[in-house]
């Protein structure tokens, strides 16, 4: 292993950072190791406003089903809004920049009123009650944040479905959660042109559906169809709603939201996050990892349809009383200078994005950052996939002007917030390295065979050996799947521990480098895609006999989707180009554009063991153009390997 260069924290920055050096980091982590409940109990008392105090910090008696801060009562919307009004009512809570450059500044007092009106609408006009599921299918507009917080205020459980998902994907998620309300928009703008969402909702609700009412925010005012008695205009109903709405008193462990994410098998699972633990860690990681100060402006470029948007556009920034930027548009439009123009314009201090975006911005606009005054930047973040050293270097030197810390934040939908990340004022950083567990998080790389800590340089399984407050509480409607998905693979000291699904290794300094998924999950542009889901979509095509999908390294997306398809008709395809189009259209309809295949090969068969198991490892190697090192002699038909290889190379 070649030693990576080390970059020390900026000294000036460190002076005022919340965690100023490694001694402070170590002191915090040692406290957590020696007095876990004391560490978390103190944090929860200090950071959250409790209506009633909790009586117990952690209840592990039914592990892996855990309870944090039991007996405590609070409301997450109050944590994010009401408690800031005394000192920050005129401070910007959200700075919204529309696709076409329209800017809207929403103060904490505005947010309070807008969320309360929204909450009253949901209660009075739609009959939404505590515990009801509400699906949110929205563009990146302030009303998406109002909708989330309005649900939190009245105790409804929101489930956001990313606006890029198709009607079928939306339908699945609506049905699984048995949602009775959908909140959507007519559409929004992309590259100055209107695009539509409401027709997708209409299609998702065709036939039998649990949904009784649909609320439509009119954003682009394009024509949509209205179903009488079901569809209502937000812009109309919100008029005259009271700006006062009493917050529902919630238990610490009442569910806050569901967010569907891909697993290695089957349909996406509804990851459930609960109230107190989630909001606590959202706030603590905002404070520690981004070190946002009172007058700072924080911009996370994610979409609220992903966990990054939940935790670091809405809940985390607002819980700490920060100013969060919300952007409707495309970061490369009108050109690759757009983010830097926004940094200059809003004096953004922390910028958080995905490696895919960094690679694209680098490729399309290497010299763009230098054209703007981006001197306000202090901390840069990356998330979602491993970042490659060239992209890291450009980000550090050109965007960070060699003075900003880069926080390579490793986490996942299930962890609620960051788990392994540098601290900008304390941790010496190395390119493309998530470094160390955050204080309070017992993240360890384990050898799956023994449960022992992995040796330096050996790839092991990235695990978390103790429950933590913002962890997944369950898979909606499927207790068994929760246990099987996360607590099945690694046992340490006789106890099943949480396994992330990722491989990782330690370097000589004990730093953690994430090496990628160990399961059949692909990471496309920082978004999780289950191979089983893509395969199920492709199988909907009547001419497909068999299919296997694998990931393949992709210059910009990190990973692309590679499909091996065996057709039913023996004589192959008359028109391959047409067939590829047909199949991709099915994928678009079943899942959405993000699942479209980068490569498709019409194979004569798939490499299988005699018991019929598809050998994905071989298919991955072929997709990458690697030499096949596995023994193929025991395959049912070893000759298909050479045939497929020839086709892929051809
Ligand atoms: C998977 C989680 C976390 C929010 C966005 C994605 C990969 C995430 C990193 C990182 C290397 C990373 C992992 C993880 N991942 N962050 N800093 N370095 N890999 O959330 O859709 O739940 O995906 O993204 O493979 O398991 P998600």
Image (spheres, helix red, strand yellow):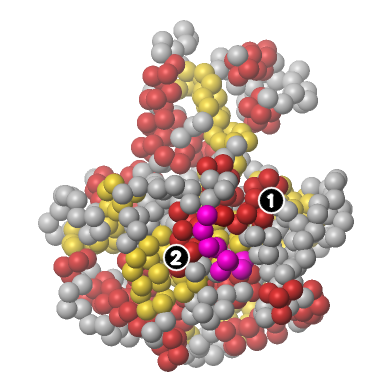
Image coordinates for residue 574, horizontal then vertical, percent: 41, 10
Whether residue 359 appears in this view of the structure is yes
Residue closer to the observer: 633 or 299: 299
Q: Is mark 2 within 8 Å of ligand 1?
A: no
Q: Which residues are magenta?
A: 371-379
The residue sitting at 44% across, 16% down in the picture is: 576
Image coordinates for residue 72, horizontal then vertical, percent: 52, 85
Residue closer to the observer: 481 or 363: 363
> Disc count in the image?
2
The residue sitting at 68% across, 25% down in the picture is: 625
Image coordinates for residue 64, horizontal then vertical, percent: 63, 65
Whether residue 356 appears in this view of the structure is no
Residue closer to the observer: 429 or 627: 429
Residue closer to the observer: 1 or 512: 1
Image coordinates for residue 91, horizontal then vertical, percent: 42, 82
Quadrant in the picture for residue 283: bottom right
Residue at which label 1 appears: 393
Residue at which label 2 appears: 345
């Amino acid at each position: 292993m070649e030693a990576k260069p080390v970059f020390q924290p900026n000294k000036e920055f460190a002076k005022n950072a919340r965690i100023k050096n490694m001694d402070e980091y170590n002191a915090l982590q040692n406290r957590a190791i020696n007095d876990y409940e004391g560490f978390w109990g103190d944090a929860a008392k200090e950071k959250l406003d409790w209506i009633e105090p909790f009586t117990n910090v952690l209840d592990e008696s039914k592990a892996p089903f855990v309870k944090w801060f039991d007996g405590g009562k609070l409301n997450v919307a109050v944590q994010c809004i009401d408690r800031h009004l005394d000192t920050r009512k005129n401070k910007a809570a959200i700075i919204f920049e529309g696709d076409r450059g329209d800017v809207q500044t929403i103060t904490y007092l505005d947010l309070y009123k807008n969320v309360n009106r929204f909450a009253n609408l949901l209660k009075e006009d739609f009959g939404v009650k505590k515990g009801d599921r509400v699906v949110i299918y929205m563009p990146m507009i302030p009303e998406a944040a109002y909708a989330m917080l309005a649900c939190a205020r009245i105790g409804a459980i929101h489930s956001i479905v990313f606006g890029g998902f198709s009607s079928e994907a939306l339908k699945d998620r609506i049905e699984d959660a048995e949602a009775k309300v959908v909140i959507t928009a007519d559409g929004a703008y992309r590259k100055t042109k209107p695009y539509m969402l409401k027709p997708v909702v209409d299609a998702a609700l065709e036939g039998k559906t649990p949904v009784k009412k649909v609320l439509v925010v009119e954003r682009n005012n394009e024509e949509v169809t209205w179903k009488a008695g079901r569809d209502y205009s937000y812009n109309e109903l919100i008029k005259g709603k009271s700006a006062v709405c009493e917050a529902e008193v919630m238990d610490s462990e009442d569910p806050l939201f569901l967010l569907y994410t891909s697993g290695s098998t089957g349909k996406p699972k509804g990851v459930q996050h609960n109230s107190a633990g989630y909001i606590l860690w959202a706030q603590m990681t905002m404070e520690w990892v981004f070190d946002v100060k009172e007058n700072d402006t924080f911009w996370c470029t994610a979409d609220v349809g992903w966990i990054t948007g939940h935790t670091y556009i809405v809940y985390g920034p607002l819980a700490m009383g920060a100013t969060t930027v919300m952007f409707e548009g495309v970061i490369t439009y009108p050109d690759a200078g757009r983010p830097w123009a926004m940094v200059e314009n809003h004096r953004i201090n922390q910028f958080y994005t995905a490696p895919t975006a960094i690679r694209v911005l680098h490729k399309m606009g290497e010299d763009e950052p230098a054209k703007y005054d981006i001197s306000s930047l202090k901390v840069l973040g990356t998330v979602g996939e491993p970042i490659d050293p060239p992209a890291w270097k450009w980000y550090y030197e050109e965007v960070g002007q060699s003075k900003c810390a880069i926080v390579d934040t490793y986490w996942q939908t299930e962890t609620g917030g960051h788990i392994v990340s540098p601290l900008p004022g304390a941790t010496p950083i190395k390119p493309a390295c998530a470094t160390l567990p955050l204080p309070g998080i017992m993240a360890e790389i384990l050898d799956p065979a023994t449960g022992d800590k992995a040796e330096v340089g050996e790839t092991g399984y990235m695990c978390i050996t103790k429950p933590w407050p913002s962890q997944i509480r369950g898979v909606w409607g499927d207790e068994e799947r929760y246990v099987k998905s996360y607590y099945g693979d690694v046992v340490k000291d006789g106890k099943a521990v949480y396994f992330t699904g990722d491989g990782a290794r330690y370097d000589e300094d004990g730093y953690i480098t994430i090496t990628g998924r160990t399961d059949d999950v692909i990471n496309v542009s920082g978004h999780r895609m289950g191979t089983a889901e893509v395969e199920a979509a492709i199988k909907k095509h009547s001419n497909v006999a068999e299919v296997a999908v694998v990931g393949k390294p992709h210059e910009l997306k990190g990973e692309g989707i590679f499909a091996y398809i065996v057709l039913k008709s023996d004589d192959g395809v008359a028109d391959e180009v047409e067939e590829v189009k047909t199949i991709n259209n099915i994928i678009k309809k079943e899942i959405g554009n993000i699942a479209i295949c980068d490569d498709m090969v019409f194979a004569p068969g798939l490499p299988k063991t005699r018991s019929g198991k598809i050998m994905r490892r071989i298919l991955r190697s072929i997709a990458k153009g690697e030499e096949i090192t596995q023994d193929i002699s025991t395959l049912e038909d070893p000759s298909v390997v050479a045939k497929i290889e020839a086709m892929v190379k051809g």
